[in-house]
Image (spheres, grey):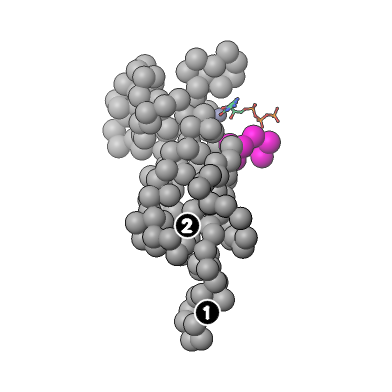
């Protein structure tokens, strides 16, 4: 199976409120998002994307529109983390994103996957699909989500 992967980096703050160590503190990461697509290679002489599954710049633009522009330089706070959520809401104009689950890399990867899956499905149907999302929280720690319905 032929796939392509686009890497996009962004910065965000978070904390894991019930963590038994450092991660309960407010802190941030430079996240690395890997978006893997599967699809047919365009075969159309004269087309800008001839020979491509999808132009890498278009993958970046879609990710920015639907996800990265929302999360970049935001603080991602769990909706039940009331003390931090309430504090952030006292800061005028602060970029806060309230998420419905603890912002671990597993949960953030799942949210990213679900958002992008829908975007690609609505736009391209079966011609082009999101196969996998990988999210690095640090260079050493990451989560991967595959679409189990896509087979070799
Ligand atoms: N399964 C998970 N474990 C942890 C998560 C997580 O999202 N899922 N998150 C954290 C912390 O938020 C932090 O991002 C990771 O910190 P740390 O383990 O210190 O990672 P480093 O790469 O900086 O570790 P080094 O020991 O410096 O290599 C914790 N756990
Ligand atoms: Zn962290």
Residue in the picture at 42% in, 33% down = 75
Q: Is residue 121 visible?
A: yes
Q: Please say if 19 is above or below 140.
A: above
Q: What is the quadrant of residue 38 in the picture?
A: bottom right
Q: Could you tell me how far apart the alpha carbons at marks 1 and 2 are, in whole angstroms? A: 18 Å
**Residue 19 screen position, x and y as percent:** 54, 16
Q: Is residue 87 visible?
A: no
Q: Residue furthest right?
A: 140
Query: Crowding near pointer 1: few (<14 within 10 Å), some, many (20+)?
Result: few
Question: What segment is highlighted magenta in the picture?
Answer: 136-142
Please, which residue is most extreme toward the bottom here?
Answer: 46
Label annotation for residue 67? none
Viewer-proximal residue among 64 and 135: 135
- Quarter, ligand 1: top right
Reading the image, the residue beneath label 2 is 129
Q: Position of residue 71 (x, y in %)?
A: 42, 42
Residue 107 is left or right of residue 118, and the answer is right
Drawn side of residue 1 relative to residue 76, left or right: right
Does residue 21 appear to the left or right of 127 in the view shown?
right
Query: Which secondary structure dominates the residues rendered in magenta?
Result: strand
Q: Which residue is mark 1?
A: 43
Give the residue displayed 51% in from the left and 86% down from the top. 45
């Amino acid at each position: 199976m032929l796939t392509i992967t686009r890497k996009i980096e962004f910065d965000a703050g978070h904390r894991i409120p019930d963590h038994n160590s450092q991660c309960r503190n407010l802190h941030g990461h430079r996240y690395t998002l890997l978006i893997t697509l599967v699809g047919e290679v365009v075969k159309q002489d004269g087309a800008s994307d001839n020979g491509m599954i999808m132009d890498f710049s278009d993958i970046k633009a879609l990710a920015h529109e639907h996800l990265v522009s929302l999360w970049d330089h935001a603080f991602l706070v769990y909706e039940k983390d009331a003390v931090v959520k309430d504090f952030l809401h006292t800061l005028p104009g602060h970029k806060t994103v309230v998420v419905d689950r603890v912002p671990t890399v597993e949960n953030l990867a799942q949210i990213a996957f679900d958002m992008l899956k829908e975007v690609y499905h609505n736009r391209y149907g079966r011609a082009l699909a999101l196969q996998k999302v990988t999210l690095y929280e640090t260079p050493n720690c990451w989560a991967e989500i595959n679409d189990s319905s896509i087979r070799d």
